[in-house]
Each structure stands twice: as C-alpha cells, then as structure tokens.
C-alpha cells in the first residue's frame, strides 16, 4: 500500500552489485544524497549509494529493511559530482545511476581505503636488517647495482618495480621520502608570458594553440604555480597512460607540490588511497586520464586538458561522454578556468574559437627556434626497397651517420594484417568478427585485434586446400624485420601495444629512447602524442594514404592531426626536424595545407568542407545503435527507425560499419541530424524513451 506517514525517513539506495537497480530502505540516520551506506541485501550485507531521500514509498514500510550503517567521508560523492552526473544523464540520455556508479572506484564502493603514500623522490638506505620478499630483494639488488643515493618514483616504475613493492620498501625505511627537494627555476619566454597572463585574465575557457615544441608545458607550470599559491587544486588531463609519468616528473622537477598520477592501471587500493587524499585536499595536483575528472576535489581551481583534440578523451562505450566537453562545463559551473591545450585543435574547438565562445591564446613559434621541414615523397613509379622509397632510405642513412635518431611511424601493429590464398582468394578471418586476422611472427600465431581471440597458424587454405598462402601488407613487426635488412648496423626499437602493454614496459621503452639505446624507433600512434625526444631529428610516415580514402567525415581531420603530432616528435633539440611522408597521392590538397606548417589554414579548409556538407560542428548528430544476433534482425530493426517521423530531424541510414560482425553480434546504426541542438535533444529524448541506445555527438562512424 502507499504510505503517506510523515517523518518516515525513506531512502532510495543504488545497490552496486545489482548493476544499476535501486531499492527503498528505512533509515534512522541523518543521510544526504551521495553517501555510501551498508545495507542488508538478501542474506548478505552489501554497500550502496543514497540517490534519493523521501517520506513516501510505494511499498509497505513494514516490509522495508533498515540501513545498517553509514560510511564516513570520503566514502561518498560530492555535491559537484552529483550535479555533474545529472547533467550527463540529461545530455547523453542515459540512466543517472550509471554515471554515478562509474565515478566511484571499486574499493570506495566496498568501503575499503588505504593510507595515501606520496609518490616522490626517495633517499636510499641499504642498511637492511629485515627479511625481504623476492620482489623487494630484486629492487634492493638493482639499487645496489646503480649505487644511487636518491631515486625517483618514476625511475623505479621504469625498471618494472610495482607500486606495492615501492610502498613496502618505504614502510621498511629502505626508501625514505626526500623532504629537502628544491624545485628548479624556469623562465617564460615573452610569448609564453603573454599566453600565461592572457589566460589568467579570463575566468573560463581558453584554447592554448601552441605549435609543437612551443613550450605549452611551461605555460601550464606557471598557471599551476599561481593556483597553488592561492591554495587551490589543479587537474591536468592527458590522453594516454604513457604520458602520465613524464608529465608528473616534469611537474615535480619545477614545482614544490603534492602531486599524483591517476589512470586505469592503478590497483583498486591505489585508486582508493588517491580518492581519499584528493577529497581531503592532501593532493594539490592530479595528472590523469579521462576518469581523473571524476575525483572528489574539494577546491578545484584549474583544469588543463592537454592534447584536447585526442579521441581518447571521448568514451564510446556506455556510458558515453566527452571529458573535454565536461571539463568546459565544470569550469562554468564552478566558475574556474579551463585550458584546452593543443598544437592541432579539434574542429569543434576551432569553431568555438571562431564564434568567440572560447578565448584564443596563441604560441606561434617553437621554444628553441627549431623548425620542422616537410618532404612529400611521391612513391609512384619508384622501385621501393622493402616498401621504402630510395630518397627516404638515403636520408635515414645520413641521419644515423650523424648520430641522430629516426622514427618510422606506421599505425598498424603485428607482422602482416592479411593472409590470403593465391588459389581461390580465401582470407583468414576471425570466427567471431568480420575482421582479417593479423599474424604475429614473434608469437607464432594469429589474433583478432577487435575481440583479442588468438588462432593457430594455418599451412593450407581452409577453402580449397591449397598451400599457396600469402601474408600481405605490413605491420610494425614486419617493418622491424625489413629495417634490420636495410640498416643492419642500426639499433632498432619497436613500440606498439604488443611491446608496451604495462606502465613498467612503457617507462623502460621511453628511458631506452632517451638514453640513446635505440637510433631507429618504430612506433604506432602511441608515440605520436606529447613525447619529448631531443635527439630525434627525422620522422618517416609510411602508409600515409589510408585516411584519404575513408568514408568517415572526420577521417581527414584526424589524419592531419596525427601527422602534425608525429611530426612534432622531431626537431625538439638543437637540430631542425624533417618529416618524410611517403604517398601515392602527392597532389591531394590536404598535403599542401600541412606543408605550409599552418594548422589554421588546414582547419579552415576542413571547416568550409564540413559546413558545405552540413556536418558537425555547425550541424548536430546523434547515433541510434542497434545490435542483433543475425543480420536480418538488425536490418529489420534499423528500417523501423528509418520509418520514424521526427520533427526537424534528418534520418540517415541504415548504416553498416566496415566491421559489421563483432563477437558474433551484428552492428548497425541510424544517424539523426539536426540544424538546432534543441531539436536533436528532443529527438534523442524521444528515442531514449523507446529504449533505443542513443549516442550523442558520436565521434566514430566506423564503430
């Protein structure tokens, strides 16, 4: 029966272990929304989040169970986090509880927390009397071999020692946190100082457009220093896990601040300890990937989104959201500054600057005065050696003779991306996905890079029985073999997801590059972002034409950003950089724009094309995604959506991506396009109410 009794404290609790379901409970505690409570659930006790407080319930109060206990701070969501979750649910048309649950680390949901141990520089004390574990002993032996009196947290991680091992050695006093550190002074150039002062004058969103190696980091450091002097907290968002240690190390080098990095590879215990320290403002600066935005800051005063254009700031899987856009929203709600830093602004950001929504701050020259020279190499009608034009081979030899480093950029890992039969044309495909299997010579097996399933090698065609199987195409692994033949005396290092799957591996790879243990580096997009290698003078881009044939309207934008970003890895030292782009389309207008070293011209060219074709950013999109176990069911459901009559909305579809079948499920979608954002929001609300899965502002039309 419906109870209307007064003063009955009834709370609705999101029970974490149920995947988003909420239940009513009675409470004798003075609760507020966002608190985590201990509750009876079935025959066990568990934890849940208070999401609503009421005096009524649709159930009989005699049947309601009571809240058993209330967890203390910091086991809760802050007011700012709760407000953000409601905004996300409204804008992205999803359940608010999904966003609230996503914000909380697993250990916090379980009511577990560990004391926070600062990640800093340590004084080494090797007078050990206590018995050590094998991992502790390995670390001590390495420290003895290095004969060092001090060591940084990042250096230990780079050698593959885990956070748990480091913390245990701190507890044993083998490592003691250094308390006498003196930050290095830094001085801004005239352009950097002007950028810093301009940003400080604006309380909201600024776009810091600095060409690669223009010294954006030092502008960030000056801004952070100012906020710290005002007792505020700072969040620095970076697109990749691999960028967090080097960004943290640079910050600690120049600023006397408590700082920490945050990313998905931290353990549950580490996340919980950082959560508590951020909540109590024991941490002043957080450097992290996108989930760091959802930490419980007490006095956040500045958000920096570095490489704001990067796709990693957008989460495509449910729940969908753009961290860059959320950072701008938070700056408005909290009345704080947000800085969007990049050498290659996204067209959305570029368009907001053009329409005076964001303040534009420019760093037009490189910090050290070096310059990147572009060379478009026409691969047509040339005899390629191992897939490389003679002009490039000769230039690489010259650079190596001078003692410089060269980066070969190929955004395709593995040995060969395609295995086919010469007799009948059969292709070795994944049994669960419409994906061609990639062969790995090192592993001696095939794998699907979508579902990660592994397959044994085949000797004969599974269709006609022929043994005429050919491995076609080139991945980073095959390129490594090719370069060993072309440059036999070179020290070659391959950097991709197969060789750097953990933070320790990545840190060690980076150290090997910086120390000169490799003079040819083969890298995928992992190396295109933000890394500073002073001895790298040449970048070679192979297979530069793929995006110029793609159907996604954003493909050329991302292709240009990637080329500009990878070009920015060279010429960061005292010597000029050179980028060699091998192409079969040398006359494409996009190459002409990029060669001029003016990204503004390239972005204006793309924006004109987008406006003429009525695509974002000045038109608005949403994607209605469908999944079915047969293609017939999928097509039928998408056709139903296409028959919808929605006011002021253009329906585009049905669209089937290049990879339709994924893990035995068929994928397709319909696009909703509108001239006004409000019309799109109404249409999305209508479709969400019909239980369709809505993705607002989709970033990938091939997914």
Image (cartoon, helix red, strand yellow):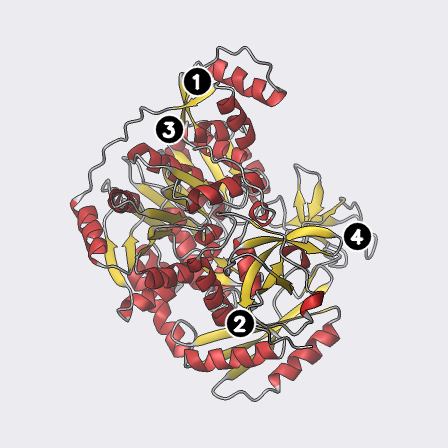
Q: At which x and y percent is residue 640?
A: 66, 83
**Cα–Cα span, label 2 and label 3:** 56 Å
Q: Earlier in the sequence, mark 2 or mark 4?
A: 2
Left or right, residue 255 beside residue 19: left
In this view, 480 is above or below 30: above
Residue 600 visible, this angle? yes
- Check the image and name the residue furthest to the front: 6
Which marked residue is nearer to the observer: mark 1 or mark 4? 1
Q: Earlier in the sequence, mark 4 or mark 3?
A: 3
- Find numbered disc 3 in the image and state the secondary structure of the residue it sits on: loop
Which marked residue is nearer to the observer: mark 2 or mark 4? 2
- Check the image and name the residue furthest to the left: 190
Look at the numbered discs 2 and 3 and tell me whether their residues touch, using CB distance below 8 Å.
Answer: no
**Residue 461, numbered circle:** 4
Please name the residue shown 54% across and 66% down the image.
53
**Cα–Cα span, label 3 and label 1:** 35 Å
- Find numbered disc 1 in the image and state the secondary structure of the residue it sits on: strand
- Find numbered disc 2 in the image and state the secondary structure of the residue it sits on: loop
Residue at image mark 1: 124
- Find numbered disc 4 in the image and state the secondary structure of the residue it sits on: loop
Q: Earlier in the sequence, mark 3 or mark 1?
A: 1
Look at the numbered discs 1 and 4 and tell me whether their residues touch, using CB distance below 8 Å.
Answer: no
In this view, 78 is above or below 90: above
Q: Quadrant of the C terminus?
A: bottom right
Category of crowding for the residue at label 2, using alpha-carbon neighbours closer than 10 angstroms: few (below 14), some (14–19), many (at least 20): many
**Residue 93, numbered circle:** 2
In this view, 358 is above or below 173: below
Q: Earlier in the sequence, mark 2 or mark 3?
A: 2
**Cα–Cα span, label 1 and label 4:** 60 Å
């Amino acid at each position: 029966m419906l109870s209307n009794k007064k003063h009955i404290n009834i709370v609705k609790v999101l029970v974490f272990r149920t995947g988003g379901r909420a239940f009513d409970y009675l409470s004798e505690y003075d609760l507020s929304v966002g608190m985590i409570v201990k509750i009876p659930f079935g025959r066990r006790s568990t934890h849940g989040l208070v999401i609503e407080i009421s005096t009524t319930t649709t159930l009989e109060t005699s049947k309601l169970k009571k809240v058993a206990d209330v967890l203390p701070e910091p086991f809760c969501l802050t007011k700012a986090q709760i407000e953000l979750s409601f905004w996300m649910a409204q804008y992205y048309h999803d359940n608010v509880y999904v966003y609230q649950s996503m914000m909380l680390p697993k250990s916090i949901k379980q009511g577990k927390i560990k004391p926070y141990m600062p990640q800093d520089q340590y004084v080494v004390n090797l007078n050990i009397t206590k018995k050590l574990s094998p991992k502790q002993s390995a670390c001590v032996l390495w420290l003895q071999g290095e004969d060092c009196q001090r060591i940084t947290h990042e250096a230990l991680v780079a050698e593959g020692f885990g956070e748990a091992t480091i913390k245990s050695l701190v507890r044993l006093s083998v490592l003691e946190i250094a308390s006498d550190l003196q930050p290095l002074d830094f001085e801004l150039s005239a352009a950097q100082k002007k950028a810093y002062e301009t940003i400080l004058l604006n309380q909201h969103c600024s776009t810091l457009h600095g060409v690669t190696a223009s010294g954006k980091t030092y502008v960030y450091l000056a801004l952070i220093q100012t906020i710290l002097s005002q007792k505020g907290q700072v969040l620095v968002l970076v697109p990749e896990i691999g960028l967090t240690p080097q960004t943290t190390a640079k910050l600690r080098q120049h600023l006397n601040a408590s700082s920490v990095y945050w990313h998905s590879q931290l353990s549950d215990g580490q996340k919980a300890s950082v959560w508590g320290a951020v909540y109590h403002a024991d941490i002043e600066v957080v450097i992290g990937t996108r989930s760091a935005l959802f930490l419980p800051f007490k006095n956040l005063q500045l958000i920096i989104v570095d490489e704001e254009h990067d796709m990693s700031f957008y989460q495509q899987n449910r729940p969908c959201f753009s961290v860059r856009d959320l950072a701008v929203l938070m700056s408005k709600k909290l009345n704080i500054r947000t800085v969007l830093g990049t050498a290659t602004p996204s067209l959305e950001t570029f368009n907001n600057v053009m329409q005076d929504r964001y303040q534009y701050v420019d760093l037009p020259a490189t910090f050290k005065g070096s310059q990147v020279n572009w060379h478009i190499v026409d691969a047509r009608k040339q005899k390629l050696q191992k897939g490389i034009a003679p002009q490039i081979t000769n230039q690489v030899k010259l650079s190596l003779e001078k003692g410089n480093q060269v980066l070969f950029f190929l955004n395709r890992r593995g040995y060969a991306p395609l295995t086919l039969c010469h007799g009948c044309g059969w292709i070795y495909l994944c049994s669960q996905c419409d994906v061609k299997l990639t062969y790995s010579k090192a592993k001696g097996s095939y794998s699907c890079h979508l579902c990660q399933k592994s397959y044994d090698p085949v000797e004969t065609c599974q269709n006609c029985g022929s043994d005429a199987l050919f491995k076609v195409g080139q991945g980073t692994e095959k390129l490594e073999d090719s370069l060993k033949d072309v440059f036999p005396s070179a020290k070659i290092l391959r950097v991709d997801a197969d060789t750097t799957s953990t933070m320790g591996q990545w840190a060690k790879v980076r150290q090997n590059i910086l120390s000169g243990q490799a003079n040819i580096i083969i890298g995928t997009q992992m190396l295109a972002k933000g890394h500073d290698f002073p001895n790298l003078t040449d970048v070679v881009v192979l297979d530069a034409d793929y995006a110029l044939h793609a159907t996604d309207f954003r493909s050329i934008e991302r292709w240009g950003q990637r080329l500009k970003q990878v070009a920015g890895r060279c010429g960061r030292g005292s010597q000029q950089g050179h980028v060699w782009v091998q192409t079969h389309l040398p006359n494409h207008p996009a190459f002409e724009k990029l060669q001029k070293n003016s990204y503004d011209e390239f972005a204006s060219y793309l924006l004109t094309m987008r406006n003429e074709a009525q695509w974002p950013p000045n038109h608005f999109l949403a994607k209605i995604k469908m999944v079915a176990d047969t293609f017939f069911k999928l097509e039928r459901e998408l056709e139903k959506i296409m028959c919808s009559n929605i006011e002021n909305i253009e329906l585009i579809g049905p669209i089937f991506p290049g990879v339709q079948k994924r893990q035995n499920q068929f994928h397709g979608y319909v696009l909703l396009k509108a001239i006004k954002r409000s019309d799109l929001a109404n249409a999305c609300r209508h479709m969400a109410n019909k239980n369709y899965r809505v993705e607002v502002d989709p970033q990938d039309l091939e997914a």
